[in-house]
Image (tube, coloured by chain):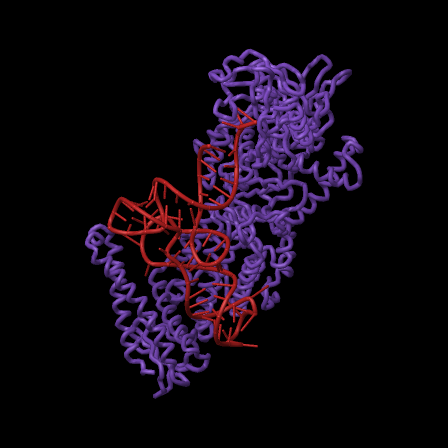
Amino acid sequence: MNGSREFPSQYSPADVEPRWYDRWVAAGLFTPYPVTPDPAPGSPRFSLVIPPPNVTGSLHMGHAFEHTLMDALVRRRRMQGHTTLWLPGMDHAGIATQIVVERELANEGLSRHDLGRERFVDRVWQWKAESGGKILGQMRRLGDSVDWTRERFTMDDGLSLAVHTIFKNLFDDGLIYRAERIINWCPRCLTALSDIEVEHSEDEGELVSIRYGDGDDTIVVATTRAETMLGDTAVAVHPDDPRYARLIGASVALPLTGRRIPVVADPHVDPEFGTGAVKVTPAHDPDDFEIGRRHNLPSLTVLDERGVITAHGPFFGLDRFEARPAVVAALREEGRIVAEVRPYLHAVGHCQRCRTTVEPRLSMQWFVKVGPLAKAAGDAVRDGRVRISPQELAARYFDWVDDMHDWCISRQLWWGHRIPVWYGPDGEVVCPRPGEEPPAGEGWRQDPDVLDTWFSSALWPFSTLGWPRDTPDLRAFYPTSVLVTGYDILFFWVARMMMFGLYAMRDQDPVDAVPFRVVALHGLVRDAHGKKMSKSAGNVVDPLDWIDRFGADATRFTLARGANPGSDVSVSEEWVAGSRNFCNKLWNAVRFALRSGATAGAGLPPVAALSVADRWILSRLATVTTEVDGAMEEFEFGRACESMYHFAWHEVCDWYLELAKTPLNSGAEAAVTTTRAVLGYVLDRLLRLLHPVMPFITEELWTALTGADTIVVADWPATGAADGPVPDPAAEAEIGALMRLVTEVRRFRSDQGLRPGQDVAAALDGIERTPLAGHEPHIRALLRLTPPPPGFAQTASLPVDQVTVRLDLAGAIDVAAERRRLEKDLAAARREQEQTGRKLENAAFTAKAPPAVVAATRERLAAAVAEIARIEATLGSLPTA
RNA sequence: GGGCGCAUAGCUCAGCGGUAGAGCACUCGCCUUACAAGCGAGGGGCCGGUGGUUCGAACCCGCCUGCGCCCACCA
């Protein structure tokens, strides 16, 4: 149907890509089946859910990378005939999105409080609509073969039901609890954060040693946060520390305040560190909180939610960072109290979203009791129900899962799933079942907080399929086949999906309770020099920019080509340009094939009809098919791409297409027919192999070549199929010899600085006695050599293997250049002789090495010796300059 | 403070026990009837250092050096 399509000499993605995506969607190719019960019983299922992008903005190169890998996996499975679902969607990204919208409001001079909760949330929904649309557009441009009929959002009704349901279940099982704890608090975002939302960096600070007490009863403590001393309620020392034994149980005066605080003995204190004495601030330090609990110390809160001092006195109203030097200065004024101040490098926690220094804060929050959940999550990987690729990263997973702290899930935000708990006037705490009327009336109110955005993400693999309802999709596609995501969110997301998936599906067979069978972790996208892409470094590339300029396929190929399990990928404009060139190469190969009348779809001609060149390229195709198939199975996209690139460019285009020209132009009907069929077959299969990575150009070319409707559901070339090509070592050896001969002659010409046409005539002496006899027409065509006229004037003689090429040169050869070339070859041959010779003289080698290796070494030695003799003879026959 | 990973051609990386590879960059020659986004040829590497295992090490083991990442409540 497309045979008459125009094929310009350059591939233009802009003319091709826009034509296909909507057609694919309209044809329902990305939809496994409509939402009906059990549609395709018995067929293998392949499903995966997209890591939902945040609605905060647009997709970056990391998304393009991740989507390329997922799409490649999905498209291959679809071609393999699996009932395939790639489920798209987006994440409301609680804190991140709220910050973005707040920033937008700030530009209008407003805060969220000016709008009030309801209007603010409406505003965020409005933002979501715009930003989300942009992301969907990007996914279409990338070619993501997602099922749009099943698109979800973490805050849509179904997912909100799932959130409420699992919260209720966990609550009833005692796995969610509310408690007053020291949590990580962001004084800018004004919300609690979980441990992993805090990023530590080595920051410079000051370690201040302060003398507490007066008279003889003094004790020196050190701190990096002097302002917190206002909230000190004790000094702790190690129970066995003789220096302080006499003070234990006594009290000392707290400078600046005059309060007396006890000295307590606690084994947590390290007597080796500093003075061996620690100030205890239970309200503002997690360690101190624990010490306080053990010794029944009061908690004195001296900082408010914005990090401002609330303790009465001269520091009241100061920000914590102003208060810190102010406290030290005040201590100095009292004299002798500051024992030492020295610069100190220590790890400081920052809010992942806004970089503000996190403040440990005592507050009432909701937590998930992770113990049993994390145990199950670890076991599922340990016992092999879930495989992590690459395996090395499993260690990181275990480290985290096996030593996880309870997860603080409440956030003091407005954008997110509101905690489904109501508090009564008499202290009642009620979590109604979904659908059940929440308690109402005087004094009842719902918890104002929302859930950590990762709480809903953790349900994604099953909430998107309809859970908690028992839907056909849930039955068909859970567990999902594979999860593709970056190693950087192993903890944030993967571990939590494991916990919640196993918990939600705890009634299922344990094997089928897991959220995914395999976790395929990829790395980060970096720039050409391996640097992380970041706005501040100015090396961020928008994938759409590349798609516009080089095409989606080139962008995808560049990303896939660098992808190895778990490792980062470096990309740059030069490389995507290289991929664009590759697209162009494919384009022109098919253009040539079409012009040559290549036929695809009829299968292979009988083996007897094939030429050696045909057998060779089919042999290579067989091997490449196996390589690509195997590599993709193991998420080794880089290897798969290398294999296809090399085969397509350097074997099919560089050699086979050139070799094919001889039979195609021969006029011999049988040869023409066979060559057309093989050419068509090879390109057909190559395009199928490439399709998962380069969907658009392969669709365009394949439909043109075969006349079929779409490559999207064409059969994936199976490894070792009965009717497929097979490896043919004899043909490979023969074409290998042909390549050597042709290359040698070209090298000779290049070294001699010969212009084309200066050596058109040549004799190929001795070729009739070699396997290359039948290839003489090929060789002459590739080298543009005519047969020698009778009695031609031969001026150069070039031996290659068993053949001597005698060339008719316009002038005398450049003897010096030829001598240089031969001497270089000679040196190489001598090195080889020496090396292999030494090896064979090694008695232990011949005794212990495998016989095949020994035999190969013997052959190499013999070849080197022959080569040396040949070169020396040639050198001897050169006229002296 | 723990744990993990990486050091191979100018750059980015593959190879992980038997003749050092790719892409890009570079040099030279070519508008050869699919493609100049191309064709042909070429240069370039004591595979971080150092010991060991082995007939044989870029590859396995020990140590050293230099980078990178993750985790961590030592004030």
Q: Nearer the viewer, residue B5 or A486?
A: B5
Q: Residue at x 35, y 72 (%)?
A: A774
Farthest residue in the bottom direction? A791
Q: What's the colour of chain A in the image?
A: purple
For the N terminus of chain A, the image quarter is bottom right
Q: How many marks?
A: 0
Please provide percent x and percent y for residue A442.
78, 15
Say which chain is red.
B
Q: Residue at x 70, y 36 (%)?
A: A98
Q: Residue at x 43, y 75 (%)?
A: A750
Q: Nearer the viewer, residue A792 or A151?
A: A792
Specify whether residue A255 is in view. yes
Q: Is residue A298 above or below residue A766?
A: above
Q: Quadrant of residue A580?
A: bottom right
Q: Is residue A75 above or below residue A761?
A: above
Please provide percent x and percent y for residue A836.
26, 60
Specify whether residue A450 is in view. no
Q: Is residue A585 above or below residue A717?
A: below
Q: Quadrant of residue A709?
A: bottom right
For the C terminus of chain A, the image quarter is bottom left
Please provide percent x and percent y for residue B71.
52, 33
Instruction: Specify whether A372 is left or right of A95.
Output: left
Instruction: Specify whether A727 is left or right of B31.
Output: left
Q: Nearer the viewer, residue A546 or A24?
A: A546
